[in-house]
Amino acid sequence: MAEVSLKVTYLHGLARPANPASGRVLQKTGFRNAGKVQLGGAPSQLWVRALGNADPNLYYVGAWKPLVVETASGLVLEVPVDMGHLDRRFCLRITPQDFAALHAMPDRAAIAFATLHALGQTAPTSSVPRGTPSMNLALTKVLHAARDALSPWLTAQDRSHHGAISNLLRLNTQADVAALRAGQWLPLPKAPDA
């Protein structure tokens, strides 16, 4: 029904860790475990099933709901960019190491999204849906650069994008904007009122 009548591409299922039977039912019906999420303040497992010809969705976790899709030619990170009147979606090829870093380091994943979002807002229309070389370089830097090298680069990027990166992190993760703008990016500092 979901595929034929509703015309959806993916189904999502949630199961609490305290109810492993639900997870087994989802797994037996073709869902893949996509990671941990918070639901109603409690940890839950998110399960995803691709329908029809859709590629399997591998990752859907965090404040920004990133998607990594497994295609025949490799892994693709889908980055949604809100332009106010227009939504754009960039698709960046990533490595298995990038994918592992997204899972293992939620602070860096949040910073990656904020940085890619800022770059996506200024990207030429012709770069959709592939993204730009600067987006690919930014993702690699945010996920893999040493903290000492990353902080000054992020501060410069935030300034060049008029505070868009720090503002987005404030919205999505309740980060302390003043601390970010002072160069304290990792671990993400929490706002005093958060």
Image: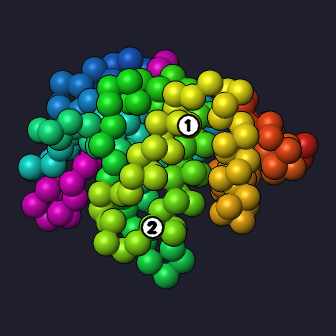
Q: Which image quarter holds the N terminus?
A: bottom left
Determine whether 101 is above or below 165 in the image. Answer: above
Q: Earlier in the sequence, mark 1 or mark 2?
A: 2
The residue that mark 2 highlights is 123
Which residue shows up at 17% across the image and 63% down it? 7
* Percent of width and height locating residue 76: 29, 43
- Quadrant of the rendered image containing residue 55: top left
What numbered label is drawn on residue 142? 1
Look at label 1 and name its amino acid.
Val
Which residue shows up at 87% across the image and 49% down it? 178
Look at label 2 and name its amino acid.
Ala
Which residue shows up at 85% across the image and 44% down it? 182
- Dot 2: within a 10 Å radius of its alpha carbon, few (fewer than 14), some, or many (20 or more) residues? some
* Percent of width and height locating residue 68: 33, 40
Q: Tell me, what colour scheme is on the image?
A: rainbow
Q: Is residue 57 visible?
A: no
Horizontal side, residue 20 vs residue 56: left or right: right
- Quadrant of the rendered image containing residue 89: bottom left
**142 drawn magenta:** no
Q: Is residue 149 visible?
A: yes
* Percent of width and height locating residue 120: 47, 62
Horizontal side, residue 67 vs residue 117: left or right: left
Horizontal side, residue 19 vs residue 169: left or right: left
Question: What's drawn in magenta, residue-wise?
Answer: 1-18
